[in-house]
Amino acid sequence: MAKIPLKSREELPPDKRHVYDGITSTRGKILNLFKVLLSSPDAAEAVGALGAYLRYHSSLDPAAREIAILTTAKELNVLYEWAHHEPIAREVGVPDAVIEAIRSGRAPMGIPAKEGVFAQAAKELLREGALTDRTFQAIEHLVGPAGIVDLVVLVGHYATIGGVLRTFEVEVDEGTPVSPGWPGT
């Protein structure tokens, strides 16, 4: 159970219900993450808008995006993020071997360099707060300046989401499958 109540649309002030509706319109439903964030509707709106940009409009290839998100979830030990993004990664074509390498902590070792560089970038950003020159150059070569900005913002965004999820002990949404092999499952 989350440390603060999960908010419903009806519990929001009438002038803030548009936030709930906006999140629902881009995602199809309200996840527990947003039910917690709705304790501060303006924060939920800002987080939702950035997340919608990163997921649906950024310049990053969907597979690269999901590799970076899964790596962030693994590095920060955020089961919720992993459970929600593992199926998305599969849908956008991330091979099972890449997903397993990230889950086991081996990535980027053992996966193709073009995919591994996104896992490496997420690890460097989370562990060191910046990219090495070598990783920066590799990413910039693959995705250009806009893509590298989107990647850095993506990892920072999902690190923030991970902090929210862990701090408030947000449970994985009902019906979301949790694959075996995650620590503690």
Image: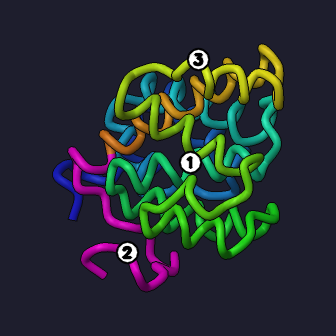
Left or right: where does residue 87 sit relative to residue 102?
right
Q: Do residues under tags 3 and 2 come within 8 Å of each other at their CB atoms?
A: no
Residue 37 is marked as none
Circle 2: element type:
loop
Q: Position of residue 93 (x, y in %)?
A: 81, 65
Answer whether residue 153 is visible to the viewer in this image: yes
Question: Tag 3: Cα neighbours inside 10 Å, few (<14), some, or many (≥20)?
Answer: few
**What main secondary structure does the magenta stretch of the protein show?**
loop
Amino acid type of the residue tagged 1 in the rendering: Ile
Given residues 140 and 76, the one toward you in this image is: 140
Answer whether residue 14 is visible to the viewer in this image: no
Q: Nearer the viewer, mark 3 or mark 2?
A: 3
Which image quarter: residue 134?
A: top right
Q: Position of residue 52 (x, y in %)?
A: 68, 36
For the point 58% across and 17% down, the residue is 133
For the point 44% across and 52% down, the residue is 73
Choose the circle earlier in sequence order: 3 or 1.
1
Left or right: where does residue 146 sit relative to residue 36?
right
Choose the circle earlier in sequence order: 3 or 2.
3
Residue 69 is marked as 1
Given residues 33 and 152, the one toward you in this image is: 152
The residue tagged 3 is 133
Amino acid type of the residue tagged 3 in the rendering: Asp
Which quadrant does the N terminus fall into?
A: bottom left
Q: Position of residue 87 (x, y in %)?
A: 65, 70
